[in-house]
Amino acid sequence: MAASMENMNRLMKRKTDLEAEIKALNDVLDSQQGVGLKEPLVDEEGFPRADIDVYSVRHSRHQVICLQNDHKVLMTEIEEELYKIHAEARKQKGEAMDTDDDQSVQSHSLAERLSPFTEVDRVDEGSPASEAGLKVGDSIVQFGSITASKFQSLLNIASVVQHSKDIIDPDTVGVLMFNKASRQTRFNCNLNSERS
């Protein structure tokens, strides 16, 4: 990678030098009555203009065009060198980047799974939730198969409760919640618990 950086520095110096030469030549053209690259070098009658140094203008125009072409080629070389440098950097950091990407995906999916989607604002005494230890202010992270990414309304929870009646253990549903002390609790809520 050091060789690529040295080559890039050499190319960038050449680019700076080319741009300085082009600017100097454009200054020469501007000093000749602002003739630039496109103004005619002859008057209305077809004779060379007397108010400019025609030879100097023609020479400067030719040099500018040549240097602009060189500049285009140089910019292509710089672009290719940048690709090489970045490819080498990715190659050197490839394993670390793969590990970081895997950890990022895992932490994102974990954060998504652990994002609360509702907060408990009422727990009836003797209810299945009360008997399971749910308290006002607890945040629900998962209720059966419902997580923050799947939650749309409390009807989702009602649907899980309804469908839980048809599974192997029809009277319980798993709930994952965080209480106010930020401790994670997982419990099964008995749906048929009798109320007082």
Image (cartoon, rainbow, N blue to C red):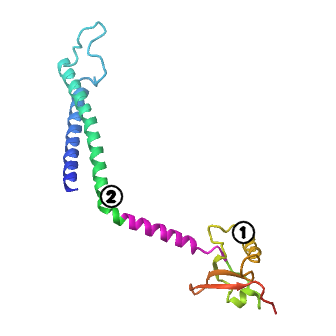
Horizontally, residue 150 falls left or right of residue 61, namely right
Q: Nearer the viewer, mark 1 or mark 2?
A: 2
Type of amino acid under label 2: Arg
Q: What residue lies at 62% left-to-right and 81% top-to-bottom?
A: 177
Q: For mark 2, does the 10 Å Cα neighbourhood hold few (<14), some (14 to 19), or many (20 or more) residues?
A: few
Residue 173 magenta-highlighted: no
Provide residue 138's location: percent of width, then percent of height: 64, 83
Provide residue 146's location: percent of width, then percent of height: 66, 72
Q: What residue lies at 30% left-to-right and 44% top-to-bottom?
A: 79
As displayed, is residue 67 above or below residue 7? above
Q: Which residue is under mark 1? A: 153
Which mark, residue 99? none
Provide residue 101's location: percent of width, then percent of height: 42, 65
Disc 1 secondary structure class:
loop
Q: Which residues are magenta?
A: 97-118
Q: Furthest-bottom residue in view?
A: 196
In which quadrant of the rendered view does residue 38 lie? Answer: top left
Residue 102 magenta-highlighted: yes
Type of amino acid under label 1: Ser
* Precedes in sequence: disc 1 or disc 2: 2
Q: CA distance from mark 1 to mark 2?
A: 44 Å
Q: For mark 1, does the 10 Å Cα neighbourhood hold few (<14), some (14 to 19), or many (20 or more) residues?
A: few
Disc 2 secondary structure class:
helix
Horizontally, residue 95 falls left or right of residue 69, namely right
- Locate the N terminus by quadrant: bottom left
Q: Are marks 1 and 2 in contact (CB under 8 Å)?
A: no
Q: Which residue is under mark 2? A: 90
In which quadrant of the rendered view does residue 31 lie? Answer: top left
